[in-house]
Amino acid sequence: MVTRKLDGRTQHQVFLVDFGSACGIGVKLYGFHGTPSYAHKDIFGRYPGIAWTVDKDGEKYDYFSLALTLCALKSGGKAKWSMEGFPRSMSSKGVRQELQQKLGERKDAAKAIIDRSKSAKKLQWLGWLFDEEGFNLKSRKRQAR
């Protein structure tokens, strides 16, 4: 968030800037792309060496990251979860289990932020963040109508 004075008044502007996996549709990516603290769990499954292509369903990853960003903003601008120690390899079962634990902790922390929020009712639309199946953009668009 950028704070500045304009005409003697303090103004706040929020800029969301994270182009960790920005690319054109149909471009092949290899391994993990993104910011671990805000990445959708499906992206971790492509790490470290599986080639994948961003397609029209890639939107769900952006919405998921946006939802986690909103949770971080709601908690004073800093994520209340940590993805430190992000593994360089998924070669062992122990490393994969550790990552799943971190993803679970991230989910619990984000849910707690929403539940404690004074605007929890307004944030109910973030409920898809906690679906085990992940966010299904098409079904949410239908429900919103």
Image (cartoon, grey):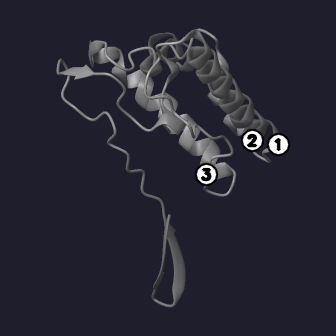
Q: Nearer the viewer, residue 22 or 103?
A: 103
Label 3 sits on a secondary structure element that is helix
As shown in the figure, which amino acid type bears the numbered disc 1? Arg
From the viewer's perspective, is residue 31 above or below residue 85? Answer: above
Number of other residues with Cα within 10 Å of mark 1, as a class: few under 14, some 14 to 19, many 20 or more: few
**Residue 50: x and y, percent?**
31, 12
Residue carrying label 3: 73
Q: Earlier in the sequence, mark 3 or mark 2?
A: 3
Label 2 sits on a secondary structure element that is helix
Label 1 sits on a secondary structure element that is helix
**Residue 48: x and y, percent?**
37, 20
As shown in the figure, which amino acid type bears the numbered disc 2? Ile
Does residue 122 appear left or right of residue 19 in this picture?
right
Callouts 1 and 2 close, C-beta under 8 Å:
yes
Does residue 82 appear left or right of residue 140 in this picture?
right
Q: Earlier in the sequence, mark 3 or mark 1?
A: 3
**Residue 37: x and y, percent?**
54, 38
User: Is residue 83 visible in the rendered structure shown here?
Assistant: yes
Q: CA distance from mark 3 to mark 1?
A: 14 Å
Q: Nearer the viewer, residue 62 or 120?
A: 62
Number of other residues with Cα within 10 Å of mark 3, as a class: few under 14, some 14 to 19, many 20 or more: some
Residue carrying label 1: 116
Q: CA distance from mark 1 to mark 2?
A: 5 Å
**Residue 75: x and y, percent?**
69, 51
Q: How many numbered marks have been drawn onto this rendered protein structure?
A: 3
Residue carrying label 2: 113
Q: Nearer the viewer, residue 40 or 67?
A: 40
Q: CA distance from mark 3 to mark 2?
A: 10 Å
Does residue 62 appear left or right of residue 111 in this picture?
left
Q: Residue at x 75, y 44 (%)?
A: 119
As shown in the figure, which amino acid type bears the numbered disc 3? Leu
**Residue 95, picture quadrant:** top right
